Image (tube, rainbow, N blue to C red):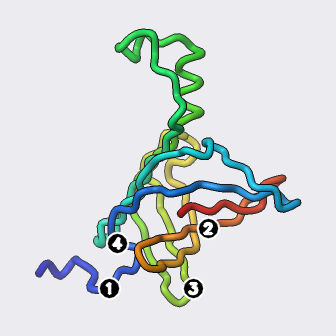
Amino acid sequence: MNSDIKTRDPVAGTWRLVSFEEQRADGTPVYPMGREVKGYISYDGRGHMSVQLMRTDLRKFASNDPLTATSEEKIAAFEGYLAYWGTYTVNEEEGSVTHYLEGSLVPNWVNTVRKRFFQVSDDRLILTFPMTGDTVSSRLI
């Protein structure tokens, strides 16, 4: 057994997204990537993670060559996809997992830290995190 592998990592694995919901201050739910969003988040048990989320209602580009896509097509694709990767640590006492972003579709997120609170129940990972502004929290299952 590789000594680098953690023996107990409650979030380790690849998790398929079931839902992504944000909540406004007045309690109204918002679905920033639509109700039918798809994606995965992976924690490898060795401290590396990645996440990919995508709207399911994205229109295909007119061309199969993404370099020739129109500005409107590129904007829609960017707004309908979220991806980042990096490393992570787990604080079981606090029930948190912290993502240290090394790469991201959003350039401003590179070299930033994202803290999430987690619950593992049966075969589900639930991630929640506070937000600012009109939207007060996000929840991914």
Q: What is the distance, in whole Å, between disc 3 and disc 1 at their CAs?
A: 16 Å
- Relative image position of residue 127 (x, y in whole percent): 55, 68
Residue with the mark numbered 4: 12
Mark 3: give few (<14), some (14-19) or many (20+) Cα within 10 Å: few
Q: What is the distance, in whole Å, between disc 2 and disc 4 at their CAs?
A: 17 Å
127 relative to 107, above or below: below
Give the amino acid type for the residue marked by disc 1 in the picture: Arg
Residue with the mark numbered 3: 94
Comes first in the chain, label 2 or label 4: 4
Residue with the mark numbered 2: 128
**Label 3 close to label 4 by CB (< 8 Å):** no
Question: Which residue shows up at 70% across the image and 56% down it?
Answer: 22
Under tag 2, what secondary structure?
strand
Under tag 3, what secondary structure?
loop
- Relative image position of residue 113 (x, y in whole percent): 55, 61
Comes first in the chain, label 3 or label 4: 4
Question: Which residue shows up at 56% across the image and 35% down it?
Answer: 80
Question: Which residue shows up at 65% across the image and 55% down it?
Answer: 21
**Label 2 close to label 4 by CB (< 8 Å):** no
Q: What is the distance, in whole Å, between disc 2 and disc 3 at their CAs?
A: 13 Å
Return the residue nearer the eye: 24 or 113: 24
Q: What is the distance, in whole Å, between disc 2 and disc 1 at their CAs?
A: 21 Å
121 relative to 124, above or below: below
Question: Which residue shows up at 62% across the image and 42% down it?
Answer: 34
- Relative image position of residue 53 (x, y in whole percent): 48, 46
- Relative image position of residue 20 (x, y in whole percent): 59, 54
Mark 4: give few (<14), some (14-19) or many (20+) Cα within 10 Å: some
In this view, the residue farthest toward the right is: 26
Under tag 4, what secondary structure?
loop
Residue with the mark numbered 1: 8
